[in-house]
Image: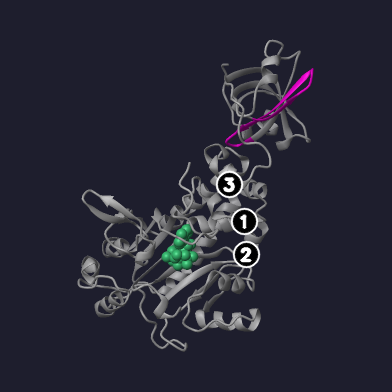
Amino acid sequence: MDGEYRSVREVQSSEFDGREAFVRGWIHRTRSSNKYVFIVLRDSTGIIQCVGSREDIPDLFDIAKELLVESSVRLKGKVKKDDRAPGGYELHMTGIEVVHAAERFPITKDQSEEFLRDNKHLWIRSRRMNAILKVRSTVTGAIHSFFRERGYHEFTPPIFTPNACEGGSTLFEVKYYDSTIFLTQSWQLYAEAAIFSLERIYDVSPTFRAERSKTSRHLSEFWMAEMEAAWIGYLDAVRIAQDEVKHILGRVLNENMEDLELLGAEPERLRKSLDVEWPVITYTEALDILKEKCNMDVEWGKDLRTIEEERLMENFSTPVTVIQYPKEVMAFYKPVEEGADAPGPVAKCFDMLAPGGYGEIIGGSERDMDIGSLKAALEREGESVENYDWYLDLRRYGSVQHSGYGLGVERLIAWICKLDNIKDAIPFPRTLNRVRP
Ligand code: ATP
Ligand code: MG
């Protein structure tokens, strides 16, 4: 069928009302009577109801009636305003070309989440996944624009690495010729090398962690958006992180309102959070809140667990940044904050927690400049210091104050889209129990 094909979105406009249009896509739903066939056509931009009568498409009416969902078709017809139709317009078909008649589609209504995830290669066509993936694209695009507009350079780290960064227990080992190495847990050590050349850098990269506990917020393969900058302290990084998340929310609210509505994501809660300051509290203050408002006693010095983060966040409706966690429970590269008002040594570090039970979305810190304390911390963690020799070199040649953080892209998407499970924030999730499809 020859003609200029338009997107479903494009033809659902007053400009096309009463005009002939060509559209193409997949059959989302279909029903028919003796006289009419109704096809809801789906393309990447949306759905449109298309109506054909036996009179208008005499040769093709019976073929159209028999088509199964997900068949690919090209349609020609006249656009007509109809307030009852989804999108407000209908297409009155005058021509139909079957590109590929689908077999019976395995996904029907009311199937379990596991079934849908087993069939993710097909479920990815659903309106729900389509909306999530559009939000995801806006989110990563917004991360790039945020940093580029502020003079940061994109810096891409290696994925195969010889070192642990976040502790050995979550490393994935990979056979590498005749030896064994790891998949990256964070770009950080390489980012710290790169700031001596580029000063301000960011990336959005895949990250791998063998997370043995099954939670609704851990993936084995996820995307981390990280930044690292010379000449800044961790509190500067907190401000950048807040600005970044607000920038992303603003973009999504601008570009994905329909997607958020379709997902039932309550975009108003996001919009409201843009108008207010986001709290920054210390770990010690967080324990006070837990004690006073949540009746929860956490021993000073213990890391906050998921349940504690959740209860803490019940007191807030915007993201909250918790700073100065106990040095003891923090990774080796986080320096001590001298003179902090706390019962024990605390680190120059922070986590940003999202409200609504979505947990930690960002983790960041200043990086220790002192070679002696870095070595001591590595030894305490049972790491072999020689493995980090190249990293320690960064403290030998013109070391400067620097800080950075990592944002969990899927965690952020899960919060923005109000998803029950992080597995839906990524097209093909990998977890302890899932590597297919
Ligand atoms: P958690 O305590 O929740 O496991 P973490 O402290 O290990 O997080 P960081 O090392 O600070 O996390 O990583 C930075 C960010 O990456 C986190 O704030 C989070 O948003 C995200 N992240 C970490 N691990 C995972 C994972 N397994 N799946 C998805 N996102 C993750
Ligand atoms: Mg973790």
The stretch drawn in magenta includes residue 44:
yes
Residue density around tag 1, few if under 14, some if 14–19, many if 20 or more, within 10 Å: many
| Residue 348 appearing in the image | no
Q: Which mark is residue 114?
A: 3
Q: Is mark 3 within 8 Å of ligand 1?
A: no
Q: Which mark is residue 356?
A: 2
Which residues are the magenta region?
28-46
Q: Where is 45 relative to 34, above or below?
A: below
Q: Where is 134 relative to 69, above or below?
A: below
Q: Which mark is residue 418?
A: 1
Q: Mark 1 is on which residue type?
A: Lys
Say whether marks 3 and 2 touch (CB < 8 Å).
no
Mark toward the viewer: 3 or 2: 3
Q: Main secondary structure of the magenta part?
A: strand
Q: Mark 2 is on which residue type?
A: Gly
Name the residue nearer the viewer: 76 or 30: 30
Q: Quadrant of the N terminus?
A: top right
Measure the alpha-carbon separation of dots 1 and 3: 19 Å
Q: Position of residue 295 (x, y in %)?
A: 64, 81
Q: Position of residue 301 (x, y in %)?
A: 46, 82
Measure the alpha-carbon separation of dots 2 and 1: 9 Å
